[in-house]
Image (cartoon, rainbow, N blue to C red):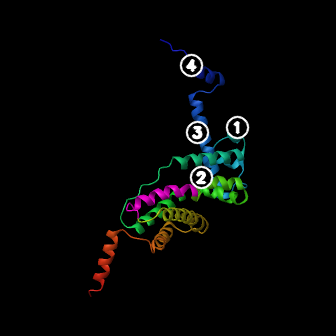
Amino acid sequence: MLIPPTRSERNSVAAGVGPRRKHNREVRRQALLRAATELFAAQGFDRTTTREISSRAGCAEGLIHRYFQGKDGLLQALLEAESETVSTQQPESLPAGGDLEEGICRLLEVEIDSLWRHREFLCVTVPKAVLDPAMGNHLHRVLGPDRRKNAIRRSLLELQPDGLLGEDEINSLAETIATLCLGLVLARQLIFGAGSGETRSLAATMARTLCTGMPRSPQIASVIAANNENSGVF
């Protein structure tokens, strides 16, 4: 029995756009986005030409205008794609309880690794954000401290189930961690070229500093006291 084509199928045939063609279009579109991201990050938005982008993507230059209406539209598509990627990411779970300093150190490492995965996006947007308030607002919405501190706050609550830290302390610590991590990735890694090992070592030092004077759980406090007593035996 022959099944008549649906209206959308008839429209696709009439327009000359079949499933294969739609697939090819998406492949080319993603290739252009990937090429643009790499070139914008490496040499800047203004210095990159549409010819270079199309050459790296292996596509005709005219497709940039067809799919994105030019280089500015291509940048906008990159921003939207990054926003969607970030919004769908699931935060890494951290072990609850235990030593708060160790947990905060791990949290710093997780945040640094997460931001480092978006380093090309940061290389593209940060230089433009300095001069373009609209770009700065978009960067702030996607990877700014205000967006990330909510996830960090949830992780901090999981790290100290005994409720040793108050609400204001949790909020302040979350914002501090978010701001520190963004600064570490931007300044230490992207600008000054620090390696991951150096950055992790600095994160551990920061965790110790942040935990100075913080209350400890009764279990950890008793272990520390016992260690101090034993250290004076000899």
Q: Is residue 74 above or below residue 108?
A: above
- Mark 2 or mark 3, earlier in chain: 3
- Mark 2 or mark 4, earlier in chain: 4
Q: Are marks 2 and 4 in contact (CB under 8 Å)?
A: no
- Toward the viewer: 178 or 57? 178
**Residue 27, numbered label:** 3
Q: Are marks 2 and 1 in contact (CB under 8 Å)?
A: no
48 left or right, relative to 116: right
Look at 65% across and 59% down and name the residue there: 126
- Mark 4 or mark 3, earlier in chain: 4
- Toward the viewer: 11 or 214? 214
Q: Secondary structure at mark 2?
A: helix
Look at 41% across and 64% down and name the residue there: 103
**Disc 3 from disc 1: Cα separation:** 14 Å
Which residue is the site of mark 2?
A: 142
Q: Secondary structure at mark 3?
A: helix
Q: Are marks 2 and 3 in contact (CB under 8 Å)?
A: no
- Toward the viewer: 44 or 216? 216
**Disc 2 from disc 3: Cα separation:** 25 Å
Q: Amino acid at mark 3?
A: Val
Look at 41% across and 71% down and name the residue there: 215
- Mark 3 or mark 1, earlier in chain: 3
Which residue is the site of mark 4?
A: 6
138 left or right, relative to 19: right
Badge 1: how crowded within 10 Å, few (<14), some, or many (20+)?
Answer: few
The quadrant holding residue 193 is bottom right
Q: Nearer the viewer, mark 2 or mark 4?
A: 2
**Disc 2 from disc 1: Cα separation:** 27 Å
